[in-house]
């Protein structure tokens, strides 16, 4: 039992040393033998192993990396535009009516700027603090703008390979007429 344990431990140590040599050579590093403390260092040049280990040469090459393209996220773009419009159209309607329920000139002046996207509701809220609905309008507009920008920036997706197809083409020549069949796969 003890001899079996020693053989297993020796095998593990040998494999660990081989893996260390292989990974050191894969990085292009020179592997230098360590001199024993009692021995004098030799004048032999450092050992340089090949760039690729024999085990790595035997493996077939892996698949090529996928080709990535940037695509617009249409759902985020359309959703962001819809949310932005849901916040901007009420502000435009309020601005067009000019604050019909306002008594003071300051109140009516605040509705002049409410139609400006994103900052209009904030400016109108600063001029007249009676409008509790204007801050949520600005937040809805900001959310719509952010969603639209993220949709326009898009994301990188792998290009799908071309699918097989077939086609039939009419053929006409001085001696014959017919159909030509073509396929790609």
Image (cartoon, rainbow, N blue to C red):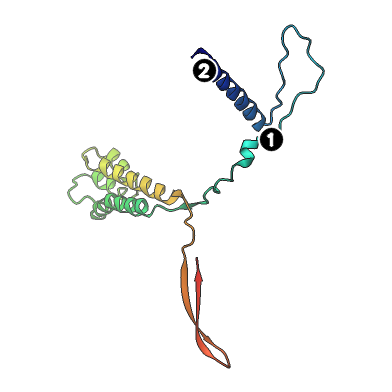
Task: Report the residue at 51% width, 12% height from top.
Answer: 2
State the image coordinates of residue 57 (x, y, percent, origin top left). 64, 40
What residue is drawn where x is 76% and y is 23%?
46
Look at the numbered discs 2 and 1 and tell me whether their residues touch, using CB distance below 8 Å.
no
58 vs 179, left or right, is right
Residue labelled with disc 2 = 4
Q: Nearer the viewer, residue 81 or 166?
A: 166
Q: Which numbered mark, 2 or 1, is in the foreground of this view?
A: 2
Vertical arrangement, residue 38 with respect to residue 131, above or below = above
Q: Earlier in the sequence, mark 2 or mark 1?
A: 2
Helix, strand or loop for disc 2: helix
Residue at 52% over, 90% down: 177
Q: Position of residue 6 (x, y in %)?
A: 54, 15
Q: Quadrant of residue 58?
A: top right
Left or right position of 124 against 155: left
Q: Residue 51: which disc? A: 1
């Amino acid at each position: 039992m003890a001899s079996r344990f020693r053989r297993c431990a020796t095998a593990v140590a040998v494999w660990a040393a081989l893996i260390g040599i292989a990974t050191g050579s894969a990085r292009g590093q020179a592997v230098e033998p360590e001199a024993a403390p009692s021995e004098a260092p030799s004048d032999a040049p450092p050992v340089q192993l090949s760039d690729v280990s024999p085990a790595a040469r035997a493996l077939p090459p892996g698949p090529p990396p996928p080709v990535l393209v940037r695509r617009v996220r249409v759902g985020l773009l359309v959703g962001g535009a819809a949310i932005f419009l849901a916040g901007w159209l009420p502000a435009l309607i309020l601005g067009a009516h000019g604050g019909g329920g306002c008594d003071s000139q300051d109140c009516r002046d605040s509705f002049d700027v409410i139609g400006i996207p994103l900052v209009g509701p904030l400016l109108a809220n600063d001029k007249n603090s009676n409008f509790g609905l204007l801050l949520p309008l600005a937040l809805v507009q900001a959310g719509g703008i952010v969603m639209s920008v993220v949709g326009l920036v898009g994301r990188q997706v792998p290009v799908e390979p071309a699918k097989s197809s077939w086609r039939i083409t009419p053929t006409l020549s001085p001696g014959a007429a017919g159909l030509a069949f073509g396929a790609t796969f």
